[in-house]
Amino acid sequence: MRKFLTSILEKGLERLKKTDNKKEILCNKETDAQVSCLEISSTFPEEICAVVDTTQEKQSKEFSHKGIQKSPARDIMNLMDSPFLALSKKRKEPIIYESKDGTCKTIISAHSKHYLASIYDWDIIIFVAGKIQKIINNMSDIPPRTITIPRHEILKALHKHNVNTQQRELENSLHRLKRTAIDTTICNEDGRYKSDFGFIDSWDYTERKDRKEIRITLSQWLYDLICIKGALLKVDNAYFEITSGLKKFLYRTARKCVGYQDSLEFSIKTLYKKSGSESSFRLFKSKLKGIVMQDDLPEYSITWSTKGNLPSVIFRKRQKINTLENVVEEFEHSRKKEQSSL
């Protein structure tokens, strides 16, 4: 079956090369997941359409209900499994982390009378990174460090529906992202960025009669991280529905580390250190067990494993629905793997 599908995809790719006006269907991975089979039937063989046709109607309804944005949210790979963010919304104690080999060192601290930027606040950065990735993909211009976003767009993307309440929360999140100080070796090996830089340099909110906009200027350090080729990973839209800080951390860790593997195992102690949690190890372990029992992370299942006296958790990929995007993505990965082995 795999060889059959591969041969079909190769034929489809050959046709795409000959038809410029249809090339975007395959090359632009940011294409809306709601693209119908009718739009691709003249380019791809009927067999490919059959793979995805059975799920299109169902997904279309789901996407419409959840309001998925056309430019998928993106997270910064280098920061996804390191403790740069508080797991709670009211942490003031600094986060201090050093990797086992000593190559990664990080100190995250809050300005006086302010809380650390939390993993909840990070949703804004994920949204902005998605916007920048879209500009990079379109190759229309060098992405700006300052992004202006309509207020309703960012609130909708972050699944925030009570405008008045969420407006205040959004502003508080932006305050924390600006006032959290970072001292790290990540993307800063030569020390060109000093320890008083934050995630964003500035932000402002403009409200006119016909327009309500939020303007965010990223710090140079964060902007440079986002613009590194291949630095961003697509985030499942369901991530924004997660209300637990620890669950958000576990999803981000799985999203970065599992990659194209079927599964990956982490010791509880390793996860505890990577999370930067201010809870005791005993409480962290208890919360983690509860999350394992719920097993409701987007994209990944999580199970508990005990080998001797070293408890661990195993992340496994959940089975993907065969959308056209998933089929093509898997095919491209397979081709790259074959080429690298030659």
Image (cartoon, grey):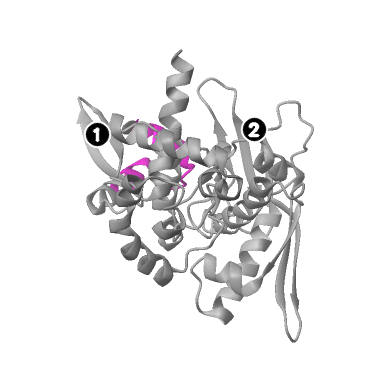
Q: How many marks?
A: 2
In-front residue for pair 159/17: 17
In-front residue for pair 238/50: 50
Front disc: 1 or 2:
1
Q: Which residue is identified by label 2?
A: 186
Answer few, some or many: residues within 10 Å of disc 1's Cα (few below 14, many 20 plus, some between 14 and 19): few
Whether tag 1 and tag 2 are in contact, CB under 8 A, the answer is: no
Apparent side of residue 204 relative to residue 49 in the rendered image (left or right): right
Residue closest to the far bottom: 209
For residue 127, what is the image quadrant?
bottom right
What is the secondary structure assignment of the residue under circle 2? Answer: loop
Mark yes or no: residue 243 visible.
no
In the rendered structure, which amino acid carries the disc numbered 1? Answer: Met
Magenta region includes residue 32: no
In-front residue for pair 23/81: 23
Residue 173 in picture, x, y percent from top left: 61, 63
Mark carried by residue 1? 1
Magenta region includes residue 281: yes
Residue 129 in picture, x, y percent from top left: 62, 51
Q: Which residues are magenta?
A: 266-286
Apparent side of residue 32 relative to residue 112 in the rendered image (left or right): left
The N terminus lies in quadrant: top left
Q: Residue at x 44, y 15 (%)?
A: 341
In the rendered structure, which amino acid carries the disc numbered 2? Answer: Ile
Mark yes or no: residue 313 visible.
yes
Magenta stretch: dominant SS? helix
